[in-house]
Amino acid sequence: MMDWCVYIVRCADGTLYTGATNNLDKRLLTHNKGKGAKYTRPRLPVELVASVCGLTKSEALSLEWHVKHQPRAEKVAFLQSKEQK
């Protein structure tokens, strides 16, 4: 199934968090309720910066790993270059 997304959110302190999910809207709500990733809980609210959807779980996890290993300056540009129009 091609319903997975990789996303980057900007936390209130300006840091970036990258994740993968099969329900982006629900995941963003979960983050902003303080029930998301341990990293984002003390850095609320979070705001979506970029996302790529329409991936298989395997593709999403692979892309997430790749994005997480990019230098900060390249993360958003890299993910935006992968966006599916």
Image: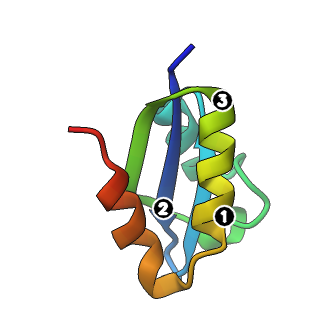
- Distance between the Cα atoms at labels 2 and 1? 9 Å
Q: Closer to the N terminus: mark 2 or mark 1?
A: 2
Task: Classify 10 Å Cα crowding around label 2: few (below 14), some (14-19), many (20 and above).
Answer: many
Task: Classify 10 Å Cα crowding around label 3: few (below 14), some (14-19), many (20 and above).
Answer: some
> Element at badge 2?
strand
Q: Are marks 2 and 1 in contact (CB under 8 Å)?
A: yes
**Which quarter of the rendered picture does the C terminus lie within?**
top left
Front residue of 42/15: it is: 15
Image depth: mark 3 or mark 1 in front? 3
| Residue 42 drawn above or below residue 73 | above
Residue at which label 2 appears: 9
Quarter where residue 78 is shown:
bottom left
Q: Closer to the N terminus: mark 3 or mark 2?
A: 2
Residue at which label 1 appears: 40
| Residue 9 drawn above or below residue 42 | above
Residue 18: x and y in percent read 59, 60
The answer to whether one can see residue 50 in this image is: yes
| Residue 44 drawn above or below residue 71 | above
Label 3 sits on what residue type? Lys
Q: Closer to the N terminus: mark 3 or mark 1?
A: 1
| Residue at x 47% of width, y 72% of height | 75
Residue 44: x and y in percent read 56, 66
Image depth: mark 2 or mark 1 in front? 2
Quarter where residue 27 is shown:
top right
Q: Is residue 44 left or right of residue 34?
A: left
- Distance between the Cα atoms at labels 3 and 2? 19 Å
Task: Classify 10 Å Cα crowding around label 1: few (below 14), some (14-19), many (20 and above).
Answer: many
Quarter where residue 74 is shown:
bottom left
Model colouring: rainbow
> Element at badge 3?
helix
Task: Please give the label number shown on residue 57.
Answer: 3
